Amino acid sequence: MSRKTRKNGCKVGSYLSELNKTEILGGLLKRLGNFSPGAFERSFDERLIFQKTVYLLQSFGIYLGFSFSWYIRGPYCPLLAKYGYDLAKCFDRLSIVRFTNATLEQRFVAFVSFLNDRKNNAEWLETLGSIHFLRDTYSGMKKSQILQMVQTKQPYLTIQQCEEAWDYLIEHKLIEGQ
């Protein structure tokens, strides 16, 4: 989540206080359609998709209370991993969540559009999340430095993938270009 987002973001809990965080997260993921409890428990890529989806959702100003740090495959939150396993146990019983706050609902709709048909593409979400996290953390760094940091940590990501993700984040106003 960007510093700008923290200032302008909305905490979900203030609008959905009757639900717990697992119910909120599960209800939003049901709307997205990219969480499968069985696959989550069996597949690293599914857990990576989960982490990056929530990270990017928060970058849209829908703050769910998860703090991320830089890890092997980009932004990661150990607490979110725990929530993921809890969610896998109760996901089928959860209901879809819609925001009563129009601003949050608009942000969520924009997020769904942002993910588009790549919502299940682990490598794409990893690239987006990594570049966004590093740009947010090191806002004074040049594009070339950030992309180099990504490629150093994640050498399987090509420069073309990183360039495409950079441009996509700029297009969706999640980072500023340089």
Image (cartoon, grey):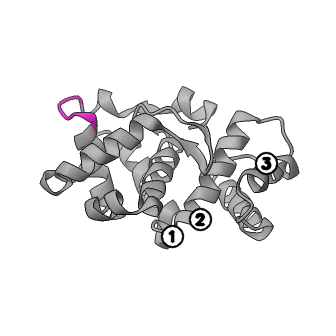
Identified at 65% across, 42% down, the residue is 133
Q: Is there CB contact under 8 Å for labels 2 and 3?
A: no
Whole-Å distance between the Cαs marked 1 and 2? 7 Å
Q: Is residue 3 visible?
A: yes
Can I make out residue 111 in this image? no
Q: Which residues are magenta?
A: 17-21
> Which quadrant, please, contains the N terminus?
top right
Q: Which residue is mark 2?
A: 124
Q: Nearer the viewer, residue 174 or 118?
A: 118
Q: Secondary structure at mark 1?
A: helix
* Residue type, numbered disc 2: Trp
Which of pointers 2 and 3 lies earlier in the amino acid sequence? 2
Which numbered disc covers residue 149? Answer: 3
Q: Secondary structure at mark 2?
A: helix
* Label 1 sits on residue: 118
Residue 32 circle label: none
As shown in the figure, which amino acid type bears the numbered disc 3? Met
Main secondary structure along the magenta-highlighted residues: loop
| Foreground pick, 124 / 105 | 124
